[in-house]
Image (cartoon, coloured by chain):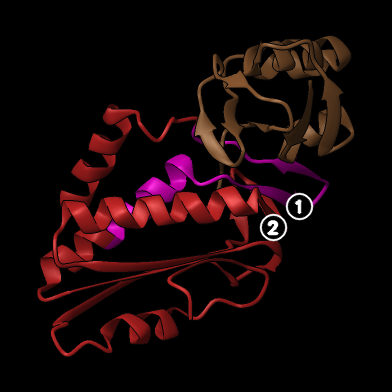
Chain colours: A red, B brown
Amino acid sequence: MPLVAIADRALDVGALAQELAADGGVGAVATFVGLVRNQNAGRRVRYLEYEAYEPMAVRVLERILREAEQAWPGTRVAAHHRVGRLEIGEASVAIAAVSAHRGDAFAACRYTIERVKQILPVWKREHFDGGDVWLEGAAVHPDDEGARESAHRIACA
Amino acid sequence: MRVTVRLFARLRDLAGSGELVREVSGPATARAVWQNLVGEFPALAAYEDSMSVAVNADYARIEAELADGDEVAFLPPVSGG
């Protein structure tokens, strides 16, 4: 299983964790799974539609994992993001981070989702009762040090 | 020279297409391609300050010089996760 992927099928965070934890030196696994919620900004969400600039998104995921693994030496991280139509309760993103100890695994996992939110070229269109809207979040260049430090601060909070 | 323009999410909707091939007189920057696009699809102007640029599937600056055959993408604010 590749450590990064833009996938059009159900995500499996357990498989990601297993892939990383096969090494006997691992003492901690932290995982994060983002799910499609049934309400947002006062609207009743029917489903979400995710779109990625795929070759770029794969490279950006690889970059984020390198950043996390450099910030917390000894950690290893895997991250998959879904595309296509996702129903309520389905997983849109799955991240696993492993380390010798829990602190670094939690931090690397949190850092990874914060960076995904900042720079991964993926977009979601929310289909709600009565219409649809493209959601727009961050516009951050990956070399923007301030944004990176902000993700790092959140990861260490 | 000829470049391929990629547009995503709402930018794609506004332009009516996610992939356009455009001739630009070189040397040209990503900014020049964007300005031509806004001329063609004025609604894109709303994204002037919030869009990001990628050249050949890597983040780039709007001032990046393009080469013949490059793929330049304009990205609205991302919303993954």
Q: Mark 1, residues whose alpha carbon is within 10 Å: few (<14), some, or many (≥20)?
A: some
Q: Nearer the viewer, residue B27 or A105?
A: B27
**CB-based contact (under 8 Å), mark 2 and mark 1:** yes
Q: Mark 2, residues whose alpha carbon is within 10 Å: few (<14), some, or many (≥20)?
A: many
Q: Please tell me in which quadrant of the rendered image residue B6 appears.
A: top right
Q: Nearer the viewer, residue B44 or A128?
A: B44
Q: Please tell me in which quadrant of the rendered image residue B15 appears.
A: top right
Asked if residue A157 can be seen in this view, the reply is no
Query: Closer to the N terminus: mark 2 or mark 1?
Result: 2
**Compared to B61, does B76 lie above or below?**
below
The residue at the point 13 percent across, 82 percent down is A27
**Compared to B39, does A132 lie above or below?**
below
Horizontally, residue A38 falls left or right of residue A21, namely right
Q: Nearer the viewer, residue A18 or A90?
A: A18
Residue B41 covered by magenta stretch: no
User: In the rendered image, which residue does mark 2 sit on?
Assistant: A48
The total of numbered circles placed on residues is: 2
The residue at the point 83 percent across, 12 percent down is B42
Horizontally, residue A61 falls left or right of residue B30, namely left
Q: Chain of mark 1?
A: A
The residue at the point 73 percent across, 16 percent down is B33
- Tell me residue A104's x, y (percent): 15, 64
Region in magenta: A109-138
Residue A118 covered by magenta stretch: yes
- Tell me residue A98's x, y (percent): 23, 74
What is the distance, in whole Å, between disc 2 and disc 1 at their CAs?
A: 6 Å
Asked if residue A127 can be seen in this view, the reply is yes
Q: Chain of mark 2?
A: A
Residue type at mark 1?
Answer: His
User: In the rendered image, which residue does mark 1 sit on?
Assistant: A127
**Compared to B62, does A17 lie above or below?**
below
- Tell me residue B29's x, y (percent): 63, 14
